[in-house]
Amino acid sequence: MAKIKMTTPIVEMDGDEMTRIIWQLIKDELILPHVDLVSEYYDLGLEHRDSTNDQVTVDSANATKKYGVAVKCATITPNGQRMEEYTLKEMWKSPNGTIRAILDGTVFRAPIIVKGIDPLVPGWKKPITIGRHAYGDMYRNVEFKALQGSKAELVLTDKGGKVTKQTVHEFTDTAGIIQGIHNTDKSIGDFARACFNFALDTKQDLWFSTKDTISKTYDHHFKDLYEEIYQNEYKTKFESAGIEYFYTLIDDAVARVMRSDGGYIWACKNYDGDVMSDMVATAFGSLGMMTSVLVSPSGAFEYEAAHGTVTRHYYKHLKGEETSTNSVATIFAWSGGLKKRGELDKLPELVAFAEKLEQATISTIEDGIMTGDLYIISSLETKKKVTTQGFISEVAKRLS
């Protein structure tokens, strides 16, 4: 059959280690045989980020703003050990953090539900979607080590030159550390509207949580802006749709989540969303079974796998040993991006292909063919553990 034609490029952000291997396998076996892929390619592998002084990351984010849809492979955020391993010029920032700051979007993550993979929380019957604010807080921080005898102050200079100071801490008896974080009303407002709109689109209740009892200015401001936007712009829409918005403290939200049966959106600040999305993904079965999309207020979408680069399996791969790495989240990143490209470009055949790719992936697992991480937790009576390559080949059979 003739390949499906694309009209507008999709931004393709390649990555690192085992997920880079999987990325190429998915393209070669699942996409290129069926789609005449049009992509604008950016190599976000750590070596190339280093050689371009991380300019390639900025370029890929700007391309996403231009073309509207991107798919991203998992990437390494370097630490001290990675600097030495890759002989880096400097400890480059998280590429996800850089991209999210440029797009100023909200990340929505939801588990992929399949028969035989039972949630670790018995009461969870429906997906729990995490809406993660993707700008600011500790991901755009400044921080110092403070020597003993230092005095740390928070200083704010307004546009008229008036200076307001507040002592953070005096390190009289010991050295320590300090950190400065920020956010903006525009970004918080965009975050709130993205979550309200997503709730309306999916007809799900929306929860929002911070720690405003402790952070009486910073976190409380998030709460206040959410409430103001809800009352002024969304209250009537939510009532008409028969869905609910409510605010609660982050610790109360955690307790509610564990007692719930799922089926709602949980909006979280940047760090909370980072942690809670991994918790929800793992409790539903695996980090490899989680969709992730960054939705920008400008109308751009970036799809990615929510997990890391699977370093341990990559080292095995380099030794020529077999691996059994879960590729589902990366497959769904591609299907999500292609589906959105098809929707925006009015290409129903591309949308249909993306949906069939997801169906083929799920049916492979439900037929009892899966990678090692799922094999050990699957409740299916008949099941078979396959290699990284073997799983993708099985998906390809069902897709064809």
Image (tube, grey):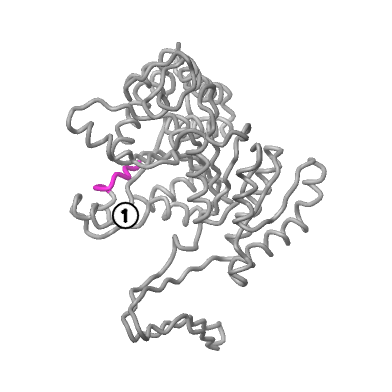
Q: Quadrant of the N terminus?
A: top left
State the residue position of label 1. 54
Location of residue 399 with respect to 102 vertically, above or below: above
Question: What residue do we see at 73% from left, 50% from top?
Answer: 245
For residue 329, what is the image quadrant? top left
Q: Position of residue 159 (x, y in %)?
A: 55, 82
Q: Is residue 75 left or right of residue 136?
A: left
**Few, some or many residues within 10 Å of mark 1 (<14, 14–19, 20+):** some
**Please, what is the three-letter code of the amino acid marked with disc 1?**
Asp
- At x 75%, y 51%, the residue is 234
Q: Secondary structure at mark 1?
A: loop
Asked if the stretch drawn in magenta spans residue 43, the answer is yes
Tally of numbered tags: 1
Q: Is residue 365 left or right of residue 192?
A: left
Position above or below: 67 against 91: above
Q: Which residues are magenta?
A: 42-48
Examine the structure image and report whether residue 237 is included in the region drawn in magenta: no
Q: Is residue 383 left or right of residue 355?
A: left
Question: Residue 162: horizontal and vertical position, in percent?
Answer: 55, 88
Q: Quadrant of the C terminus?
A: top left
Of residues 9 and 388, the one nearer the viewer is 388
At 49% from the left and 34% from the top, the residue drawn is: 337
Image coordinates for residue 373, horizontal then vertical, percent = 39, 29
Q: Is residue 151 above or below residue 296?
A: below
